Amino acid sequence: MSETNATVEKWNRFWFEPTSPVAMALFRIFFSIILLENMVVHLLPDFDIYFGKNSLVPIKDMMSLYWGSGSYFDVLALLHSDRYILAAFWLMVVATIFMGLGLFTRFSSWTVFLLLMSFSSHFQLNQNAGDNYLRLATMCLALSNAGDALSFDNLIRATREDWRLTGLGPRLSAPWAQRLLQVQLCIAYAHTWYSKMEGEHWNDGTAVYYAVRYDDLMRFPLPHFFDQLPVYMVLTWGTLAVEFALFTLIWWRPARYWVLAIGVSLHAGIEYCMNLPMFEWAFLLTYVLFIYPADLTRCSNLIKNKIKIKHGEPYKLAFDGNCILCIRTIGIVHRLDIFGRIKPVDFHHDEENELSGLDLGQAEKEIMLQKRDGTWIGGFKAFRFMALRLPLLWPLVPFLYIPVVSFVAELIYKLVAANRKNILGSTCSPGAVACEVST
Amino acid sequence: MQSSSPRSKYFSFREAINYSSSSGPFTEGHRVLVSSFLVVFFIVVGAWLLPEWTPYKNSITTYTWPVMLTTGWVQYWSLFCPDVRDRNYHLTALIEFADGTVKIYEFPRMEKMDLWTKFQREKMRKLFGDNIAWPNFAQFRPSVCRYLARANNDTTNPPISVTMIRNIVMTPPPDPKHWVYRDNLPQHINKEILFSYKVNANDLLN
């Protein structure tokens, strides 16, 4: 009985113990780019051949010759015009962009998943293992909390949250969908390894010799000193060993990063020799999910430190720690500041020496940011200065320097500042010194 | 500049950076629901990926296959296995017109494309190279022939037949005494007729 309990305990810990969503969020962002590549680069140019009314294999033939009595999911079969099918395609593209940005993440991910499934059912004959993996990974994204970090959803949440109570770290949640994708990757490696073990050329060490001679898959040339039988034998058996490790030793903590490193080498080698778009990148990207959260944080801190060494200390941003409006604004700024270039300083509660030269009266009215020469700038100018230093705001920067735009933006800033209560909420914490915003 | 306001229950900014809230533990019901989903997933996918010789595989997949189709869990991981391909090939088609002239159509050939085009048109390789060229997908050849007939239709001289041909060559075995380097592979010189289709008038209607 206690053994059963221990198994249930292990099961629950593996699938449900709350963990950081950052790995899944990183996966979501880069995976969306692969999906977009698939749609815009690989499908769109030959769209009519695959999906049009006069396609190579029209849907009625696909249904009778491939589907049979199978219950394939395909909403496109309900659309009787090429125009609607094209509209569904662009809907899928837009949903993928939304998914990558983390905007309505769950809804957009489900939309992408259902449409991916539909397009693959509608024309099965151009589908490869990479397409299978894209579909399965999208399902896992839709089931996950990938929108809880590095996303617009998270920014929107910051407009309602009080980080003094919730903390600023991404919200932890049960990682079962992330684990499912990890396990799915291992299933793929296990299956391909087992199938290869049954192959004659994989056993006699010549499989890679033949594989790199598929002339329809060739990408870059191999130097002749490399194009030798002993090299191919090492690579053939090496592939089997690496694939075996990728579904076994990968779960053993001391070996994990070594296994991932040789996995990267394997896929990089295939990527060099062979033209298999999406497949290698989607698999490699899933390796991100195997990085432990603490190591991801360490990586992030390392990058921040490198940037600090190169570009100097972060800029101080003075805020009113007793005002919920300011608290929420700082929550948004912190989420946008992925490289740690801004250091918020609470002018009510932090050390006084952090704030030398700050005009407290002005700080009560607008955000204040300290430049390198020690002077403080406020309002729109502070925002523009900050935008230049926060990569996620760079798309806005060119507009902020157009004279007319900056004049209008200054007015908008004042308008927003005057109405912050309506935008971000107006509840002040107990003992608040300043809540009202004067302009 | 320390405030006297009651701050003890709040994090400072520095403290907040290192703290994450949690969406809270799953309820028992939620766990059972998700666990059931996971178990179904593993049974359905596991049954499908079992080796063909596994006893009762077909009886199990009779039940799991419909679930797999509807949910999009279909998966194949058999690239380069169980064995690698030992031949190279491409498809061509002969389109014969009413006046007896014949046009040769060459299906997209990846090895003739530049790097970008090859990258862009990978799905064409899958379609014509991995699928249509082989017996498992032979049922689609009439559709392909009809497409070619429509694409080459001339009302004054319509196509009357389409013949699909596989041009193939075996990859030289890895014999160190007669080594053939990767950049010097033989051309696809052998021809096999895959399929002939007689075009009828309805096939030419859009």
Image (cartoon, coloured by chain):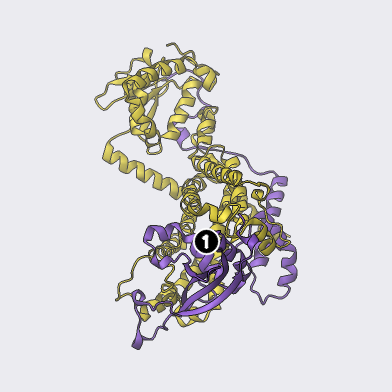
Q: Position of residue B17 (x, y in %)?
A: 45, 35
Q: Position of residue A142 (x, y in %)?
A: 59, 46
Mark 1 Cα-neighbour bin, 10 Å: few <14, some 14–19, many ≥20: some
- Left or right, A55 with respect to B174, comes to right
Quadrant containing the C terminus of chain A in the rendered view: top left
Residue A248 visible from this viewpoint: no
Residue at image point 57% right, 50% down: A138
> Which of the two residues, A213 or A434, is positioned nearer the viewer here?
A213
Residue at image point 47% right, 74% down: B89
- Left or right, B81 with respect to B176, comes to right
Q: Position of residue A307 (x, y in %)?
A: 31, 41
> Which of the two residues, A233 or B190, is positioned nearer the viewer here?
B190
Chain seen in purple: B
Q: Which residue is mark 1?
A: B152
Q: Looking at this rendering, what residue extends furthest in the left direction?
A: A373
Which chain is home to disc 1? Answer: B
Can you say whether A90 is above or below A135 in the image? above
- What colour has chain A? yellow
Quadrant containing the N terminus of chain A in the rendered view: bottom right
Q: Quadrant of residue A222?
A: bottom left
- Left or right, A365 with respect to B129, comes to left
> Which of the two residues, B151 or A134, is positioned nearer the viewer here?
B151
Residue type of the residue flagged with mark 1: Asn
Q: Position of residue A379 (x, y in %)?
A: 37, 19
SS type, badge 1: loop
Can you say whether A31 is above or below A276 in the image? above
> Which of the two residues, A414 or B180, is positioned nearer the viewer here?
B180
